[in-house]
Amino acid sequence: MSSDPWGRVDETGTVYVRTADGEKVVGSWQAGSPDEALAYFKRKYEGLVVEIGLLERRVRTTDLSAKDATAAIDHLREQVEAHHAVGDLDALRQRLDKLVEAVEARREERKAEKAKQSEEARGAKEQLVAEAEELAGSEQWRAAGERLRALVDTWKGLPRLDRKTDDELWRRFSHARSAFSKRRKAHFAQLDAQREEARQHKEKLVAEAEALSGSREWGPTAAKYRELMQEWKSAGRAQREHEDDLWQRFRGAQDVFFQARGEVFAERDAEQRENLTRKEELAVEAEKLLPVTDLKAARGAFRAINERWDAIGHVPRDAKPKIEGRMHAVERAIQEAEEAEWRRTNPEARARAAGLTGQLQDAVDKLRGQVEQARAAGNTAKAEKLERELAGRQELLDQALKGLHEFGG
């Protein structure tokens, strides 16, 4: 019989292993010596030790699933419980029990981690839903559309939740996207309708502009073009493919008209500048009549100059007030000379002037006496009031005396 600390072989060739529960039959060995039998079953034990060690390392260092780890443990435990090896099987059982604990701890850890990830995913999806529902009412069509597409990509990268929760959040998320898409579609449909309406309106404006391009009624047509431009600005934009073409036609028609007007105005301006030069020469000739010494000769000469003036025609608008003012000044001077001559030779007017002068002289003399009396009486306020009245009457008297002098009185 052969023996070992962990097993023995009896005289019949039966191999035993020692455990805490007593000896267990390992198997029967008839092919060789008892030592060879013990050596064989000890090698099987060492094989179990190696396998358990490998499993321990896999559990510790890899992401081996709890399911696969448990299956491997059960497989090794079956081999240990079969007692087909000689060695410290109780130690192997303890190691397997610790592996079970480690796998269970790993299972709980992963369960907790998965629950945490699920909660985080739920929070993230709820945030995505809230943002999508807010964007559903946006009118920033491009930016909101791009953001919603980015939210979809983010959603796809998040883990799934339990079916009920995930389906409910997705339903809200999808509804928000659909609501935005529906509003955007309606907006652009309305915009297309408005642009089509603008196109039709601008087509009419272009037709009117082109019909007016050959007009030679400069003022009314220019005013009409201004009205058409205001209408154009308020009509809104047509579709992009039509807008530029319509604008080119609209501006082109105006350019034809305004170019023709510009050419005519340039010719007219040249003529008016020449007229101004001629009228300036006549103004100089008229101004030489002043001062009037011979009223009859001055009147005849000015009439002849004025007839030549009227025959010349228009001058530039900005020069008109100044050049006409020079002629009017000469005309007023001649008229004043005529009035002075009439007053000088009119007996009735002279008599009226003399009578008025006498009345004013009497009033001045009377007021002067009243002023002296008031000052003598010490009434300064009354004296000052009478002096202001005296000054006004004196001024009227001076003017009357001047007029009387013009009559030769």
Image: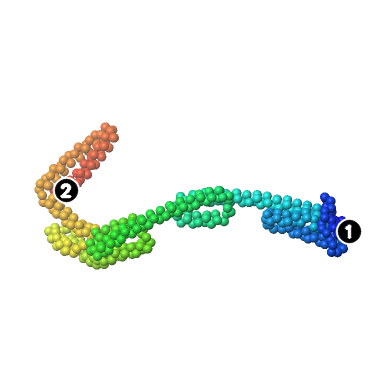
Nearer-the-camera pick, 290 or 143: 143
Where is residue 39, by image quadrant? Answer: bottom right
Residue nearest the viewer, comparing 74 with 285: 74
Question: Which residue appears at 28% of the width and 33% of the height?
Answer: 379
Could you tell me residue 257's position as x and y percent?
Answer: 27, 64
Residue pointed to by mark 1: 11
Q: Is residue 259 left or right of residue 145?
A: left
Residue situated in front as seen by the camera: 180 or 159: 159
Q: Which residue is at the front of the view, 309 or 395?
A: 309
The residue under the point 10% across, 49% down is 346
Report whether 357 appears left or right of 264: left
Q: Quadrant of the N terminus?
A: bottom right
Image vertical order of residue 206 relative to residue 386, above or below: below
Q: Report, in whole angstroms, how far the alpha carbon at label 1 lies from the one at label 2.
A: 178 Å
Q: Is residue 305 visible?
A: no
Q: Residue furthest left?
A: 347
Identify the amino acid type marked 1: Glu
